[in-house]
Image (cartoon, helix red, strand yellow):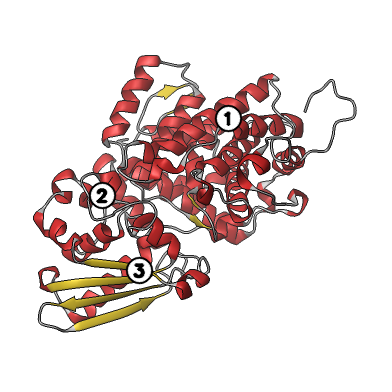
Amino acid sequence: MNAHNSDPKDTEVRRLGRFVASADAASLSAEARDELKKRILDSIGVAIGALDGEPIKYIRTHVEDFGGRPLATLIGGGKTAPDRAAFYNGALVRYLDFMDSYLAKGETCHQSDNLGAVLAASEYADQDGDGFLAALAVAYQVQGRLCDVAPVRARGFDHTVQGAYAVAAGVARALRLDAGKTANAIAISGTCNNALRVTRTGALSHWKGLAYPNTAFVGTHAAFLAYRGITGPEEVFEGNKGFKEAIAGPFEIDWSKEDLENVKLSIIKKYNAEIHSQSSIEGALELQKRHGFKADEIDGIEIDIFDVAYHIIGGGEEGDKTVIRTKEEADHSLQYMVGVALIDGNVLPAQYEPGRILRDDIQGLLKRFTVRPSQDYTDRFPQEVATTITVTLKDGRKFSIDKTDYEGFRTRPMSWETVIAKFNGLAEPFTSERARTSIVDAVRNIEKLRIRDFATILANLNA
């Protein structure tokens, strides 16, 4: 990493740097390429659907006030510096909590969090579509694999910690950095981006949706510093007080044997709800359709579920999930999400409007839930997202359903038709029909485009 060191130690970050720098979209399988494109369109739809979000408006004001050379495009129009574009576009992808997810045994992350940064760097570097796909696939691979073998949630750290390595890797690949500079980018970003899990415990704030965009902002900045020649700690992984010793514990990844196929294991959300709730929501709605009961007939709802869901959204170690006042609390409450689905028939952005959250119907139903962790279901996670929903009505009738997956899970991949329908539903209030068609066509044929041209399409939503 240091050009003046003639006999450098072959550190882990150097090996990761070689993997990233050599990544080529030509190595993507047809399935992985197709799934990656689905996630690009899904993420863009979610981003467009968030354009009028409260914190998004604050960030837009912040970016416009501080300025920045107009080198990277903001979704919906305008330009700024690449690191600020990474933050703003990343916040758009993240705000609705409707983006894709990756489930590992001890960690959950959202690999589409990297899209804003990779898009900004690809536009800056005048990448073609294949270069953009390679960079994004790298970010998916690095983040997913680190979550597999180096979970940090149980130690009190946020999943954005692994993302610090992933986003720097993706940006470095988009900038065409060599292996040495790539290693420096990853080392700088990984060293300085170690966020606390308190972001997602207790009373939740705007920061729940902005923690990774901030990681992307800093990771993009780190990659550009490495691009200029700044070096980072060579032993960021294995060194004294490095990632393994200070946070993650021991783990091994042989980057020389990694591919770009991890995207096939990520999952797309069917409902605008935290990822571990998806099978429960689908199951509750199927149960309601099968038996025809209404929400006001319910006396109680019991949910048995795997421990990760129980602890994050069910009232376990991350706090009571029946006191719901804000969007951030609502979209991390299993009780709220299942309850509002049974009342309204779906969970979409409208279910997180302040007036909807505070209505008596859902606030009353919140108190009728019992959520329990199941060891059997925990043992089957993440290969399954098993849940049992039991509804008892006021007249004494009781109905139950078991689920192990949902539409969008790795066992039931979401079709292009469903992804496009989700995209159109989210984007329609903010775009013309012509613009939506242009975006869908551009994503499906991204290899034929320069990313600067693609970014122009994302700026002109009413063209």
Please identify the quarter of the rendering in which residue 341 is found.
bottom left
The image shows residue 238 at horizontal and vertical percentages of 73, 41
Residue named by callout 1: 192
- C-alpha distance separating marks 1 and 3: 37 Å
Q: Which of marks 2 and 3 is nearer the N terminus?
A: 2
Residue named by callout 2: 349
* Nearer to us: label 2 or label 3: 3
Which quarter of the figure is the C terminus placed in? top left
The image shows residue 217 at horizontal and vertical percentages of 50, 29
* Nearer to us: label 2 or label 1: 1
Residue 144's place in the image compared with 120, above or below, is below
The image shows residue 84 at horizontal and vertical percentages of 46, 25
Query: Is residue 124 in view from this perspective?
Result: yes
Residue named by callout 3: 372
Query: Is residue 448 in view from this perspective?
Result: no
Secondary structure type for disc 1: helix
Q: Nearer the viewer, residue 314 or 411?
A: 314
- State the residue at coordinates (36%, 51%): 98
- State the residue at coordinates (70%, 40%): 237
Secondary structure type for disc 3: strand
Left or right for 395, reference 192: left
